[in-house]
Amino acid sequence: MKFTYEDLISGDSIFVNGIGHFRSPQLKELKPTQGIGTWKYNLYIGLMAWDRSEVVKFMKITTGRNLRKLEQNETLSLFDVMTLIDEPRMLLQNAMAFFVVEDVSWDKHTRSFLLTDSEGKKVGAITRENFDEVRDMMLQMNYINIGESAKPVKHSSAQAQELWERAQQYLKEESAKAPPDKNMNLGNIISKLCAASTSYNLFNIYDLTIFQLYDQFFQYGYLRAMNLNEMAFSNHGGENFDMQGWLKPIIKI
């Protein structure tokens, strides 16, 4: 299912029948002291975006297991791979819970994640059959950006600390293959948009959702380019200049 641009830019959660309400987190939820931190956010996004081989490699490092049989069993779906072992399954559960409104729990009898409201009533489920669609919808809500980030201040347990360290090592190895674009670092985008905009500043920008932030950033870049194009036309003239060009959408959904 593809969400409309109007729904995504609104900042509201989007209900999908049989599953639940998908949401784009606000920037304040990524703050290191008030939220989960950008490192964990990037990890959550990675879990939604990685393919089967990347997930298996990540699981090998974070669990310390060989997982050869799992890796060679082509009959297992990505959902199967990520839910067969407790540690990756719990991490996946936490990641998906961050991108939906409802509470998420694992049901071992149906081998699915159940989504329930504040009163404990079932709203929907994430299953082997709809998992790929769920991942896609979560990524749509987040206008994906994965980059380096700071280490969380503290961990809830020694096990969480060990998991973080193993996961960090994996991401370091991956980043060595294709260095991240520092220009697209989340902090840099926040800073640049605040400096360039007359509306956003470091006091109010954290109320934006992730999708809204990237949308405003790319819209600003597009309008800046259009302004330069208009100045060039006014000075030198030319053919086929579109006065309504600035109104064209910059993304297709």
Image (spheres, rainbow, N blue to C red):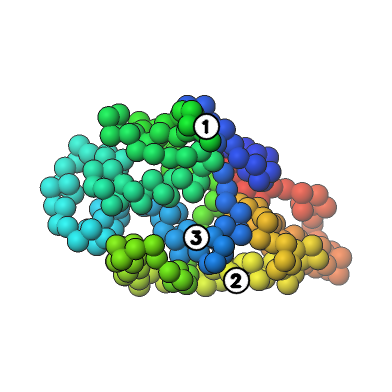
Neighbor class of circle 2 (other Cα within 10 Å; few <14, some 14-19, many 20+) is few
Question: Amino acid type of disc 1?
Answer: Glu
Which residue is rendered at x = 79% and y = 62% of the image?
A: 199
Residue receiving disc 2: 188
Does residue 207 appear in this view?
yes
Give the amino acid type for the residue marked by disc 3 in the picture: Ile
Which is closer to the viewer, label 2 or label 1? 1
Horizontal side, residue 248 vs residue 33: left or right: right
Q: Is residue 192 left or right of residue 140?
A: right
Q: Secondary structure at mark 3?
A: loop
Rate crowding at label 1 as few (under 14), some (14 to 19) or many (20 or more) other CA atoms within 10 Å. few
Proximity of marks 2 and 1: CB atoms separated by less than 8 Å? no
Percent x, y of residue 45: 45, 54
The image position of residue 177, as x and y in percent, is 34, 69
Return the residue nearer the eye: 121 or 19.
121
Q: Earlier in the sequence, mark 3 or mark 1?
A: 3
Q: Residue at x 73, y 72 (%)?
A: 195
Q: Which quadrant of the rendered structure holds the C terminus?
A: top right
Disc number placed over residue 119 in the picture, else none: 1
Callout 1 secondary element? loop
Q: Are marks 3 and 2 in contact (CB under 8 Å)?
A: no
